[in-house]
Image (spheres, rainbow, N blue to C red):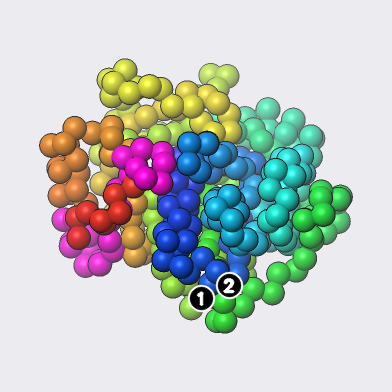
Amino acid sequence: MDGQFGSTGKGALAAWMADYAIRRGVITNFSGAIYSGGPNSGHTFYHQDKQVVLKQLPAFSVYACLAGYIVPAYLSAGAVIDPDILKEEANRYPDIPIFVHPNAAIVTEEDKLAETEGYIAKVAGTRSGTGAALARKIKRDPSAIAGQSLGHIGPNVVIQNHRIKPENFAYFMEVSQGFSLGINSQFYPKVTSRECTVMQGLADARLPPSSLVETFMAIRTFPIRVGDVDGHSSGNWYSDQHETTWDDLKVPAELTTVTKRIRRVATFSMDQFYEACRANDPSLVFVSHMDYLKEEEREELVSWLTAARDEMEKEFLFLFGYGPKVLDVDHELRGD
């Protein structure tokens, strides 16, 4: 899960975890990867030198597939499906069995159009139709869910009421978007249409808290927010951080995965880190974009994070990312 505003490298972390499972010889222990995301968010990773961008399928399943292993993908009842995007990804990876929960929400062209005006437009979101689709589901529109309106996608896509049994099998779950974008966060209304926590991911899959074994939280050295659009701001920052520029950081400007807008970028917030840790209780924290820092800045950030961990009396490990590829991740869990 993501511990900031999104785009923290969750896809890269999921790919590293899949690669780690392969190297340890335990990838076949996984009965599936669960995802509750939608077309308003994307996970990106590299397999060898090829960039892979996903909006509907879990990165863990796709990385495993590219490496020659099959880990079925489960799109939970909390998922939001854009039929065209799912069809494209299903066709791209025909060897992955994809199970869509019949209560997953379905995005229509009308949903996308609805997000270009009114309050949803003003939050400067992705305008992917995700929020509007969920609103129709909440209003009990029968056509809002997969079981009623998702047509044939492909031979590897099945609409099925999942019977996930975490007490007997292992699953890898990916929670989309960013923790601080949760609908109940202090940044309302500049937020997404639901909570973005580990517990929300479990609830979307109707899994009990006792099924949770490990939580991996991704953060980045310079948090981002989606770019403003049509004069509407995507929101504020925590009080202990301030917005900066890509020129000041001396790195190329980043574009958001879904909208391709230039991302807004800010300094690191310890307040946000404390809040995300307390809400999600991670057992491992992945810190991406360490390559954006000078050596002395890296050491300073690590000292802040380890001091915060001690203060919270947590015992999570650290993993550090110095680029977008699996080989760019520090395998030594530096800092522990």
Q: Is 10 colored magenta in this rendering? A: no
Residue 138 image point, x, y percent: 72, 54
Residue 323 image point, x, y percent: 36, 38
User: Please, what is the three-letter code of the amino acid marked with disc 1?
Assistant: Ser
- Range covered by the magenta-colored residues: 306-328
Which residue occupies the foreground of this view, 205 or 185? 205
- Label 2 crowding class (10 Å Cα cut-off): few <14, some 14-19, many 20+? some
Q: Quadrant of the N terminus?
A: bottom left
Which residue occupies the foreground of this view, 29 or 289? 29
Q: In terms of secondary structure, where does tag 1 sit?
A: helix
Q: Quadrant of the C terminus?
A: bottom left
Residue beneath the point at 33% across and 23% down: 251
User: Please, what is the three-letter code of the amino acid marked with disc 2?
Assistant: Leu
Residue 289, quarter of picture: top left
Q: In terms of secondary structure, where does tag 2 sit?
A: loop
Residue 204 image point, x, y percent: 61, 63
Please report contact status of discs 2 and 1: CB closer than 8 Å, yes or no: yes
Q: Is 315 colored magenta in this rendering? A: yes
Checking the image for residue 334, the label placed there is none
Residue beneath the point at 13% across and 37% down: 296
Asked if residue 204 can be seen in this view, the reply is no
Residue at numbered disc 1:
211
Would you say 221 lies left or right of 30 here? left
Residue beneath the point at 28% across and 63% down: 316
Which residue occupies the foreground of this view, 169 or 277? 169
Asked if residue 296 can be seen in this view, the reply is yes
Residue at numbered disc 2:
207
Which residue occupies the foreground of this view, 300 or 326? 326
